[in-house]
Image (tube, rainbow, N blue to C red):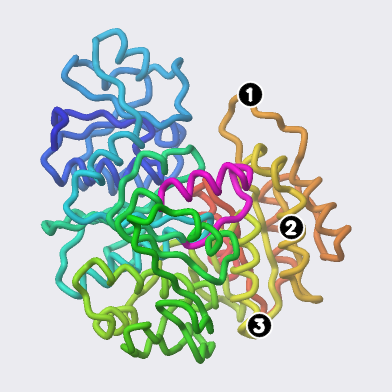
Amino acid sequence: MSEPADYFFVGVGGSGMSPLALIVMGQGGRVEGSDRARDQGRSPEKFAKLEAQGVVLHPQDGSGVTRPTQVVVTSAAVEASIPDVEAAHRVGARLRLRADLLAELFNAASVSVGVAGTSGKSTTTAMIAHILNVCGRDPTVMNGAEMKDFANAPAVIGAGDLFVSEVDESDGSIALYRPTVAVVNNLSLDHKSMDELRRLFGDFAGKAKTAVFNLDNAEAAALRTSLPASVRVRSFGIDRAAADLCGIGVRPLPQGAAFEVLAASGERASVTLQTPGRHNVSNALAALSAYLACDVALADAAKALGSFSGVRRRMDVKGTAGGVTVIDDFAHNPDKLAATLSALHEAPGRLLLMFQPHGYGPLKLMGREIADALAEGMGAQDRLWVTEPVYYGGTVDRAVTGADLARMAADRGASAEGVADREAAAAALLHEARPGDRIVVMGARDDTLSDFAAGLLARLA
């Protein structure tokens, strides 16, 4: 690591910060940090886990930034008025963006696999990590989600020459990466306009030695034609005979899916997943495609996927009580919502949905598309309650509300209503629930949604 080994992470509990902090510490760095969520008493178990792993935590009041030798790592969303940032200026500590530091570590690896896409990148990254680990490649992995196969850690510090990371388009940091293998799962409306997404994903893939595209997503497939001749282009898809890696004979299972995979080379393998849904078959094909540059045989990679346990908050079953199953899920944009609802409807049972939008900004940008995905994905007996978006302060336009989203979904035929807060949602869900129902808590950017789901399960019991 070329940077000074003395780091302070502002917002160290965040999904992008905590795995990077652990990787830096695993490579010999001293790591301290702060998080206002900790100061507010939210998700105490997460911060206790970070402390147990050796991260020194401070209040977010500037008291932890004391030395000019420290490198203070922030995200692009951190305001200059944060006390830790003010303290950095005062003591002469260097400021670095999280994305810059991660990209530097990633680009320095001998073999780097970058996983991009509007949806599915965390699961695909975890699948690649599991395959490489089972096959003895000992990778370093940076994920934005907690991986069940690695003790619910969001990061893996390996001794091998491989660095696997999901890459983020929402803040434009995808432009910083120079991958050996670029995996592009899909492109769809989320944080940015489609024109901007096409440019970002195209530039990312154009810097790779090998770029892998999902033929089941028209936007991803179209990017293949615009790459430099120096890039080796490969593809995957379900029932796509032209793909270099083709999944056929997809069969839903009670708790997963099974399919055959055919490679253009003539190789063939069987895959049985413990994670349900056609979208996870697509994620598996994306992960298997990474074997092209990682010295792993297709048969070995396919076998390894059979023991993949999934990632936290991706159709994460919290338990069953009184005949009602509670599920915690990260779905928040149109594609993710559609994929989750489709997968859930592969099994019987009415869905009682609580959805918390992941911000006022995203809701204003794609509220209509979210309403479409919810209404189209819900069954006739399903019911939906929408809370207000997650909000941690700031000057964002709050003109479009959760109640507005509920009305849009109802106008499209869904049984949907807005609720004032989570307690109102909980009361409605518990009053409505009957044996055989599934309560699904959906939303992103808020770790306490998992606590809410667990609380529902406890109250059902």
Q: Judging from the image, what secondary structure is the residue with disc 3 in? A: loop
Graded by Cα atoms within 10 Å as few (under 14), some (14 to 19) or many (20 or more), the crowding at tag 1 reads: few
Q: At which x and y percent is residue 34?
A: 34, 30
Q: From the viewer's perspective, is the residue at label 1 or at label 3 nearer?
A: 1
Cα distance in 3D space between marks 1 and 3? 43 Å
**Is residue 225 found inside the magenta-colored segment of the image?**
no
Residue type, mark 1 in image: Thr
Q: Is residue 318 above or below residue 408?
A: below
Q: Can the viewer see residue 406 in this picture?
A: yes
Label 1 or label 3, whichever comes before in sequence order: 1
| Image quarter hosting the C terminus | bottom right
Query: Which residue corresponds to mark 3?
Result: 436
Q: Residue most toward the front?
A: 229
- From the image, tell me which residue sits under label 1: 395
Relative to 383, 8 lies left or right: left
Residue displayed at 42% across by 59% down: 122
Q: Quadrant of residue 17?
A: top left
Residue contact between numbered discs 3 and 2, judged by CB atoms under 8 Å: no
Please identify, in this view, whether the residue under mark 2 or under mark 1 is nearer the observer.
Answer: 1
Dot label at residue 219: none
Specify the segment rendered in magenta: 185-205
In the rendered image, residue 385, in percent from the top left (x then y), is placed at: 74, 57
Between residues 19 and 271, which one lies in front from this camera angle? 271
Task: Give x and y (percent) for residue 277.
Answer: 54, 77
Badge 3 amino acid: Gly
**Sooner in the amino-acid sequence: mark 2 or mark 1:** 2
Nearest the camera: 102 or 175? 175
Q: SS for tag 1?
A: loop
Which residue position is annotated with label 2?
A: 385
Instruction: In the rendered view, tell whether residue 124 sits above or below residue 166.
Output: below
